[in-house]
Amino acid sequence: MKKRKPTSMDVARAAGVSQSTVSMVLNGKQLPSFTDETIRKVMDAAAQLGYEGVRRERAPALSNTVAVFCPVLSNPYYSGVVQAIEKAAYAAGFRTLIHTTYRNPDMEMRHLQELGDTVAGVIFTHIPLHIKMVETLNRQIPVVVIGDRNDMIDVDTVEVNSYRSGAAVAEHLMALGHRHIAFLSTSLNSENKIRVQRMEGVRDAVKNVGRGHSLTVKSQDVSSSSDINDPDIEHKVGYELARECLQIPKLTAMVCVNDMVAYGAMDALLEAGKKVPQDYSVCGFDNVFPSHMTAVSLTSIENHMLSKGKDAFDMLYRRINQIGTAAGTDLSLTRVEYQPKLVVRSSTGPARSDASEG
């Protein structure tokens, strides 16, 4: 007997929702009206039952606006990525609409709900907090995410391996004789996975060397309201955590989760009368513009912010132009990965001799 194909009613029963909800979720309609949990239940039920009734064709794009989601603009990394997106968009006859979320799930949700039919596509400069919703939105309009290769998401992505970035920094410092290293960071949690990946890369590299080496992790939670009200919050966190590290005699190096935190750490060291790198080596991530300056000269990981921004728009633009064509029915994913590159400057040097046995 031929097996009956599952229907949308079967999916609705399995997911515990109405048939109309199944139809709207699987066809990408009124998506922001549903919670992540509802979307997940419907998508999981459809996958388990082998339901194939998902609409794949899209209407032609009616807008020349691209929405860009960004956590903050006070960090030069994000403002640099946004500027690269805008430059590419303007050259193609598009304009951008910037949505700053301050890493707040409710704010991200509200911005998603307000999109409607006003944009031709969406670019996230960070991993979305509502991943299932964004994946389903991608069935309605093109979405591109700039993120980390270890954080799988079913949309087109531009990626850097943050874990490998952390390992590269740790290997550089240990080659200079540093045995006791501190990792300084703003919030380390599931909502900030790139930070966690960087820390884990440093941790595992230190662990692999084995006996006689250690990593001290210091972090300070930063709320969404702090991100909004204090553009200097990352610098302050770096400053405060570095002051704490000065109380640990054996430490000789500080790896900071990004360059802004590293600037704060360097200011704390200089204020305490310490020399960089003679007393402490300091590293960052992202290689933002001030890190190039002679007075700063920060060793950092190049994360290709300008190239990633341009690539993200180019990927989105190709998808927009495919809408309504045969190619537009292809939901295969494109992933572009950049290799992290260590840029060594004068903020790192050999470990001080008095800590060699620490």
Image (cartoon, grey):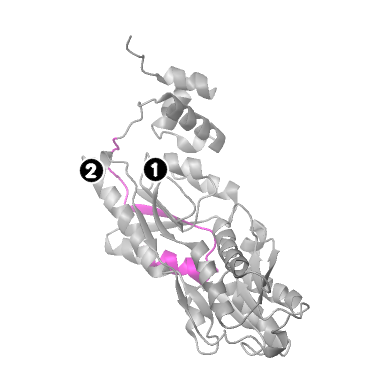
Q: Which residues are magenta?
A: 57-86
Residue at figure coordinates x 39%, y 69% from the top left: 306
The answer to which of 159 and 313 lies nearer the viewer is: 159
Point out which mark residue 138 bears. Answer: 1
Is 64 left or right of 339, judged from the image as shown? Answer: left
Residue drawn at x 38%, y 42% as measured from the top left: 117
Quick one: which residue is furthest to the top in this view?
A: 1
Identify which amino acid the numbered label 2 is placed on.
Ala
Mark 2 or mark 1, which has the lower sequence index? 1
Give the number of marks: 2
Q: Which sits in the foreground, 358 or 229?
A: 358
Question: Foreground: 189 or 254?
Answer: 254
Residue 45 in view of the camera: yes
Is 82 left, or right, of 347 in this rendering? Answer: left
Which quadrant is home to the C terminus? bottom right
Q: Quadrant of residue 186?
A: bottom right
Q: Disc 2 marks which residue?
A: 327
